[in-house]
Amino acid sequence: MGTPASAGNRCYFDINPAYFRVMARIVQKFGGTSVGTIERIQAVAKRVKAEFDAGNEVAVVVSAMSGVTNQLVDYATKISPLHDAREYDVVVASGEQVTSGLVAMALQALGVPARSWLGWQIPFKTDAVHGKARIQDIGADELRRRMSAREVPVVAGFQGVAEEDNRITTLGRGGSDTSAVALAAALQADRCDIFTDVDGVYTCDPRIVAKARKLDKITHEEMLELASQGAKVLQTRSVAMAMSHGVRVQVLSSFVDAPGTLVVNEDEIVEKEVVSGIAYSRDEAKITLVGVQDRPGVAAAIFGPLSDASINVDMIVQNVSEDGKTTGLTFTVGKADLERTVSVLNERQKDLRFARLVPDSNVVKVSVIGVGMRSHAGVAQRMFQTLAGKGINIQVISTSEIKISVLIAEEYTELALRALHTAYGLDQDETRT
Amino acid sequence: MGTPASAGNRCYFDINPAYFRVMARIVQKFGGTSVGTIERIQAVAKRVKAEFDAGNEVAVVVSAMSGVTNQLVDYATKISPLHDAREYDVVVASGEQVTSGLVAMALQALGVPARSWLGWQIPFKTDAVHGKARIQDIGADELRRRMSAREVPVVAGFQGVAEEDNRITTLGRGGSDTSAVALAAALQADRCDIFTDVDGVYTCDPRIVAKARKLDKITHEEMLELASQGAKVLQTRSVAMAMSHGVRVQVLSSFVDAPGTLVVNEDEIVEKEVVSGIAYSRDEAKITLVGVQDRPGVAAAIFGPLSDASINVDMIVQNVSEDGKTTGLTFTVGKADLERTVSVLNERQKDLRFARLVPDSNVVKVSVIGVGMRSHAGVAQRMFQTLAGKGINIQVISTSEIKISVLIAEEYTELALRALHTAYGLDQDETRT
């Protein structure tokens, strides 16, 4: 209720109480382990109730109970490895459906008005690329209306409905993060909380670097690079969506009661770190082609067939030709694609005219990430010096505006991460106990 | 393709090939044990394919994999015994959703064009009485169109959608039988096959009466009485629906390859048996009120409060009053309602003015059923004589046009069933091995 300008006057302020909204509108997303048992679902409901009781408008997005999706995928694969993606979606989307109903019940049991919403009910419209659909439009008006009337929508994540065939679609593994960020964008939410089994984004993997610090804030861009370069906290696609829609995302644990890491626009961060975090990925394999004919179009001739086979090539280095006739070419692919890459190239050895192919899967990609790099020189140089100081050979280098990645032998992973973490001043004061 | 009336003439018969349809349109329903594992789902697909390959139009209705619904109900109950029926429906309907997708996949793997259909997609419109919704209308046109184009719809049983709130509804336990019969009616199917874990309807429970015979045919009315009087082969509601829509239902096993029992309209059965089957129900409890004031309105005064408490009263006998002042009243209720019945009546003992209440749950109701009774005298007499001959006392009797039920002490169940089975000439020639 607004306050009348003066007693006896007509109260204009009452027309739109939402105009005076001071509470926040929040989307809370809970992953599979957070809703893995009935007890945990009840704990989730308590957490939602706390935000709700604080006067906030809350929408919840849920994953399937942990283990459920794997079981359903197993069923589908057992029937046929080449199953119809549309039927796959019908089967696997049921997991989030169950959780949405259970969480709504658990909220009601605590006296919080709540109801479940399935993808087709909202609707969460997607294209018809079943199994990895893309969100096109979210019918958020009804949800917003109910939220302002103090009801909590509990949305089944990961799923949508294709207008084309009126069938259930899913967004691909980890799609619930994307559901949550997309819903936050559609609801113009003040924040999207992603509850998971870690309590935030760290400067490096704390299982390897004991001195890793939890970050209070990080930019969308940095988070996107961290996720793409191997950090498994948030799904890359959801970060990209948060970035393009300016959604403030908080990563936090559903098992501890503490603030997590805020992923925000760059302008929200006053004091920018030169380097915010160090990521690594063991999911890399290196291929070196020796004795490649050094002629125009050779790179296209090599990478064309790989692209046709849907193999993503990441880092590429072409060696300087010594004799002016042949050259060496080194590049990386995902470890899972190594075998296929080798067979695609060997089939074309005569056409491509390379002498020898040397595969190596004992490599790791280490990436140093920070928006501060843009204005700071010497960041790469420090990386090279630090690794050299530990006797670690750099095999391939690639850089972007806010990232430097190097490929090194896998056995040096821990040594490299710890040395770089110290070198960039990321170590926390005390060792975590 | 039709045959032209004469060569050279325009072929009018080709206009509507469906006009010459000789194949059948069949609905096949598979229960929870029939789809309990991936191997069984694949066996179901083979069975459907056989009908399909024979040129028939087939629609499939599926239950949840056995155990799944119980698990989901447990979840809901654990969160709150008083859960929201709308959320309950969201949760439990997921079981049939999974099976529909998996069976569609299994059919596709055998080369049969198939797709899953959920309640809201068809739509299977129901009222909004969540948890035990009633079917109002089925959008069968699109299914029929696809079936005539050689596609097999795999329909998730047990579920619908309420137009009122656009939310998932369920039809109550065993509702998949009802889904199948309703779909068969909407599709004007020639037959509705209900696959279950028994191979047909027997003259009596074969676990008790070894000489029980499997019936080839039985009328809807008889089946309805059998189901209501304790035979657990088909859900009562689905039989009532089959009767009112004239749907031919076949009960058969998904584990053996043999015809089952056809449930049909009476006019399809030429040679009517006097007695078709004998049912029994141990789910009975008897209550005797002694010393009831014999005055007008006493029955209403007693049964009114029970009706208010949603307690169904089945058989009722009022003893003839000897002194003209008091009388005895005996009636039966479901065993599960006995305790509540006793407490409801005891609370009102002063008002109702009865001297004593005697509960007895050691009773069984035995029913002899057959449409032939209408034209044959002496059926009841044979029942009474047979039981008397074995020294079995009849406590309560009730009859309908095609049924005689008696209440006897539970310990005589087996003896009574076997004696009656022989007395009515139902024994098969050889003892089943």
Image: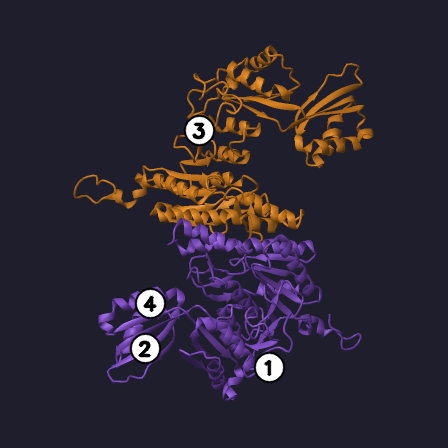
Chain colours: A purple, B orange
Q: CA distance from mark 3 to mark 2?
A: 73 Å
A217 or B222: nearer the viewer: A217
Q: Is residue A236 left or right of residue B313?
A: left
Q: Residue furthest right?
A: B350
Q: Does B175 sit above or below residue A148?
A: above
A297 or A3: nearer the viewer: A297
Discs 1, 4: same chain: yes
Dot 3 amino acid type:
Thr
Dot 2 amino acid type:
Leu
Query: Looking at the picture, how far across and down is residue A77, in whole percent?
Result: 42, 52
Which chain hosts label 2?
Answer: A
Among numbered discs 2 and 4, the one appearing first in the sequence: 2
Which mark's residue is nearer the viewer, 2 or 4? 2
Which mark's residue is nearer the viewer, 2 or 1? 2
| Label at residue A414 | none
Dot 4 amino acid type:
Thr
Q: Is residue B271 left or right of residue A420?
A: left
Q: Residue at x 57, y 47 (%)?
A: B72
User: Mark 1 falls on what kind of element?
Assistant: loop
Mark 2 residue crowding within 10 angstroms, few (<14) / some (14–19) / many (20+): many
Where does label 1 land, which residue?
A269
Q: Is residue B53 left or right of residue B262?
A: left
Among numbered discs 2 and 1, the one appearing first in the sequence: 1
Q: CA distance from mark 1 to mark 4?
A: 42 Å
Q: Residue at x 45, y 50 (%)?
A: A75
Dot 1 amino acid type:
Ile
Where does label 3 land, which residue?
B261
